[in-house]
Amino acid sequence: MPNIDFSQMITVEDKAAQEQGRRRDALHAHRDQLIAAGTTVTVTGIGDVPVRGLPFDQTVMLSLLQRGAARVAANDTSADILFRDDANTEHMLTGAQAVELAEVGMAWVQAVMAASWALKDAGNIPADYDDPVHWPS
């Protein structure tokens, strides 16, 4: 008679939890890829500006926000804050434009994060977590 160790059996619930763990990890990776790839934002007086969301790029956005806010507070309207976008186009920004660019870019990152939270908070993460319908454009 074979010895069967029933304590080592994997239940349906265990398999479902493992699958949800795999999907959660994949969802996080997909979210991070979307943020890194970036988006195109619209800035008053400039138009569409493609931006990325890698950690370095997010640091640049914070710098733009800080520098731009200082210019706005000083009533300095000169367009001399240099920003090079993801298409390698240089833009000379006013303080207000720098703040707008940073705020819109950071709002997009937040929207991607919120989409991932919504998928996780809804219960089981769906198999189609990477379907564009779940993510901001």
Image (spheres, helix red, strand yellow):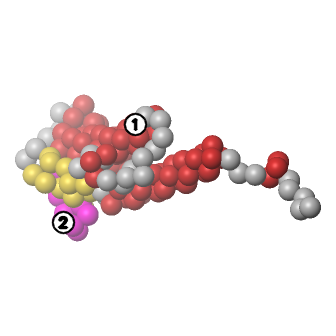
* Label 2: how many Cα within 10 Å (few below 14, some 14–19, many 20+): few
Q: As drawn, which residue projects farthest toward the top?
A: 73
Q: Where is residue 43 drawn, in percent x and y?
A: 14, 46
Residue 52 colored in magenta in the image: no
User: What is the quadrant of residue 109 in the picture?
Assistant: top left
Q: As drawn, which residue projects farthest toward the front?
A: 1
Q: Where is residue 84 drawn, in percent x and y?
A: 24, 62
Q: Nearer the viewer, residue 93 or 77?
A: 93
Residue at position x 18%, y 44% in the image: 97
Q: As drawn, which residue projects farthest toward the left?
A: 45
Q: Which residues lie in the magenta part?
A: 85-93
- 50 to 98, vertically: above or below: below
- State the SS at label 2: loop
Amino acid type, residue under disc 2 in the picture:
Thr
- 89 to 6, vertically: above or below: below
Residue at position x 21%, y 35% in the image: 72
Which circle marks residue 51 in the picture? none
Residue depth check, mark 2 versus mark 1: number of the one nearer the observer: 1
Q: Residue 43, can we see it?
A: yes
Residue at position x 21%, y 67% in the image: 87
Q: Where is residue 18 drawn, in percent x and y?
A: 61, 51
- 69 to 7, vertically: above or below: above
Query: Badge 1 is on which residue?
Result: 118
Query: Badge 2 is on which residue?
Result: 89
* Label 1: how many Cα within 10 Å (few below 14, some 14–19, many 20+): few
As drawn, is 114 to the left or to the right of 79?
A: right
